[in-house]
Image (tube, helix red, strand yellow):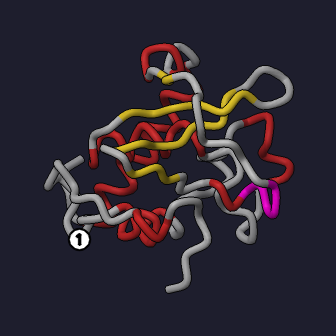
């Protein structure tokens, strides 16, 4: 598979959780999530623009925190117009962003961004529920426990 997400070349960090059968690298996770991301998992404010052709739209924070569950590391955010953060992952010295394709040809700056915390993001119940749905679907698809 040809990957287009930011950092795909180095996204081979090992999983620290064996909870999801067949998910051993972020590339594996991307492959599976590509069939799970949907309009429901998209941030409500962006749903009008979501499509199967732009499946990573509005999926960043819930995906980044799921990546953190499986691979460890930290979640960082790039401040966007409107005051929202676009979330991505750093594991060790490897930076990758499974949802960067939503920005097309725009080049994002992955340097010197603030760390993001799930406690803050999940204060929004709709976001926490979307994360839990994504996590449950991943467990279903990989044969993990729900």
Residue visible at 58% across and 18% down in the picture: 124
Compared to 126, does 86 lie above or below?
Answer: below
Residue for badge 1: 22
Is residue 103 part of the magenta span, yes or no? Answer: yes
Q: Residue 40: where, in percent of width, then height? A: 63, 47
Task: Provide the major secondary structure of the magenta segment.
Answer: loop
Above-or-below relation of 41 to 18? above
Q: Nearer the viewer, residue 127 or 3?
A: 3
Res 133 quadrant in image: top left
Location of residue 5 by image quarter: bottom right
In this image, 122 relative to 16: left or right?
right
Residue 130 in the image: state x and y as whole percent.
53, 38
Secondary structure at numbered mark 1: loop
Q: Identify the residue at horizontal 45%, vertical 48% (top origin).
A: 134
* x and y, in percent, of residue 142 in the image: 27, 66
Left or right: where 38 falls relative to 91: right
Image coords of residue 6 (percent x, y): 58, 60
Up/down of 78 relative to 35, above or below: above
Residue found farthest to the left: 18
Q: Is residue 129 magenta?
A: no
Q: Determine which quarter of the picture holds residue 80.
A: top right
Q: Which residues are magenta?
A: 102-106
Bin the neighbour count of mark 1 within 10 Å (Cα to Cα): few under 14, some 14-19, many 20 and up.
few
Residue found 22% across the figure and 64% down from its top? 143
């Amino acid at each position: 598979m040809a990957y287009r997400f930011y950092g795909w070349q180095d996204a081979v960090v090992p999983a620290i959780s064996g909870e999801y059968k067949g998910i051993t690298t972020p590339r594996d996770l991307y492959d599976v999530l590509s069939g799970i991301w949907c309009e429901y998992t998209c941030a409500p404010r962006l749903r009008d623009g979501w499509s199967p052709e732009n499946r990573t739209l509005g999926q960043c924070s819930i995906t980044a925190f799921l990546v953190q569950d499986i691979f460890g590391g930290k979640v960082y955010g790039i401040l966007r117009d409107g005051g929202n953060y676009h979330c991505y992952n750093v594991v060790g010295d490897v930076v990758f962003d499974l949802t960067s394709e939503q920005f097309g040809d725009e080049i994002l700056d992955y340097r010197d961004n603030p760390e993001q915390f799930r406690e803050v993001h999940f204060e929004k119940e709709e976001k926490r529920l979307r994360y839990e749905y994504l996590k449950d679907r991943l467990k279903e698809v990989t044969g993990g426990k729900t």
